[in-house]
Image (cartoon, helix red, strand yellow):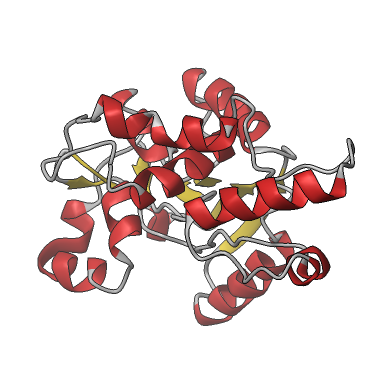
Amino acid sequence: MKRRTLIAASIAAAMTLGTSSLALAQTTLRIFLGGTQRPDVMRQILDDYQQRNANVKVEIEVGGATSEQQQQYLNTVLASRDPSIDIMLIDVIRPAQWAAAQWAEPLDSYLGADKDKIMARYLPAYREANTVNGKVMALPYYADAQFLFYRKDLIEKYGLQPPKTWDEVKTAAQKILAGENNPNLRGFETAGAPIEGTVCTYLVPLWGAGGNLTDPSGKLAVDPNIAKKPFELWAD
């Protein structure tokens, strides 16, 4: 059974299509997405699609509260070559994994001569995440972003400005912690468990330090001195 992807690139999501025949030839499509990935919005999109394609019925399967739980389930489905799911919403870190496992068929032939024009619609980060060894393994479905939230009351109390750099985050946090002397107060909090989200929280300060995980050709190229900067930031 061939697998091809229509992947939703976000810091946390992508959509994969896997069928034993062309999707347009089917009368029923089944989509899998996580419980936190807004199945209500997906249903509205699909209802509109069905109105324009009366010969196609689209069903939704919802499961997995976290990225890891969703991937564990899909690993089982794909490894067993179960054809019951046609389209899958997965995390943006998965296209490369699925390409390596040969669970996803490149979309280049389906995009045809319009490939570059279609990919140009998306932000560079999402294009790159869904392109593996020069092949388009997925298409973005939705995007999200990270934000720095801060305690406005404490920033004002200590005469500080909202931080614009990681060094300013560190300086402000240390000053507030020293002044408050509150054991329940944390200077900076972020994802640090061995989960998909930690990839994102690591990359942001890595990029801020001028580093990257890969070189322009896509090969792993981590500068050890820069790679440790995010860890030093969190430790400080």
Please state which of residues 160 and 164 is positioned toward the viewer in this rendering.
160
Q: Is residue 62 left or right of residue 110?
A: right
Say which of 28 and 177 sits in front. 177
Seen in the image, is 157 located left or right of residue 57?
A: right
For image coordinates 77% across by 44% down, the residue present is: 178
Q: In the rendering, at what x and y percent does residue 8 appear? A: 46, 55
Q: Could you say which quadrant of the image residue 144 lies in?
A: bottom right
Rendered location of residue 212, percent (x, y) = 28, 41
Residue 175 relative to residue 90: left or right: right
Q: Residue at x 10, y 67 (%)?
A: 113
The x, y position of residue 180, in whole percent, is: 86, 49
Q: How far across and down, in percent of the image, does residue 50 sit?
A: 57, 73
The residue lying at 83 percent from left, 69 percent from top is 153
Above or below for 212 versus 173: above
Position of residue 162 relative to residue 100, above or below, is below
Q: Nearer the viewer, residue 84 or 212?
A: 212
